[in-house]
Image: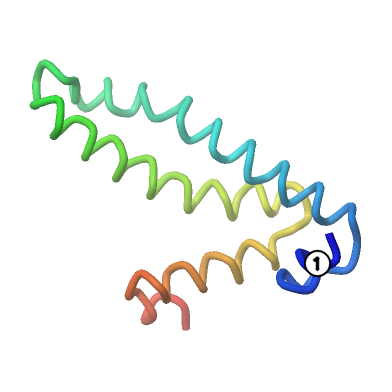
Amino acid sequence: MKKLKERWGIESNTQIVLILIVFAVTGSTASYIGKPILAFFNITPETFTTFGYWIIRILILFVMYQFLLVFFGWIFGQFKFFWNFEKKMLTRLGFKQFTE
């Protein structure tokens, strides 16, 4: 736990628990609301190839996950941590202009 706290720059074990809860809730929520979004746009394996369907689904889930991560981070009082996490991730993906 000590290494994780140092790496993430946090002080307490409570923050670690909250951060892990945010990651879990965000992943579950993104997956749960992804299907209705795909259904709304009529994106199914039957209307696209199976490969195309999964590529679109993963892209939609990835984008939703980024927004939900910051949102749930804010709800759980960890906005600063997740905002910095998002900026670091966007920079690594080549979207540095969006982090400034």
From the viewer's perspective, is 59 left or right of 3? left
Q: How is the image coloured?
A: rainbow
Q: What x and y, as percent, mark residue 11?
A: 88, 68
Disc 1 marks a residue whose amino acid type is: Lys
Q: Quadrant of residue 78?
A: bottom right
Residue drawn at point x = 45 percent, y = 30 percent: 31
Depth check: give the residue in front, 92 or 73.
Answer: 92
Residue drawn at point x = 51 percent, y = 73 percent: 88
- Number of on-image labels: 1
State whether residue 39 is above or below residue 88.
above
Q: Quadrant of residue 44?
A: top left
Residue drawn at point x = 68 percent, y = 52 percent: 73
Q: What x and y, as percent, mark residue 62?
A: 38, 47
Q: Quadrant of the N terminus?
A: bottom right
Residue drawn at point x = 36 percent, y = 23 percent: 35
Q: Secondary structure at mark 1?
A: helix
Depth check: give the residue in front, 63 or 89.
Answer: 89
Q: What x and y, as percent, mark residue 67?
A: 49, 51
From the viewer's perspective, is 38 left or right of 73? left
State whether residue 40 is above or below residue 81.
above
Specify few, some or many for label 1: CA neighbours under 10 Å numbering under 14, 14-19, or 20 or more.
some
Residue marked by disc 1: 5
Q: Quadrant of residue 84?
A: bottom right
Query: What is the residue that sits farthest to the top in this orientation?
Result: 46
Q: What x and y, as percent, mark residue 96?
A: 39, 80
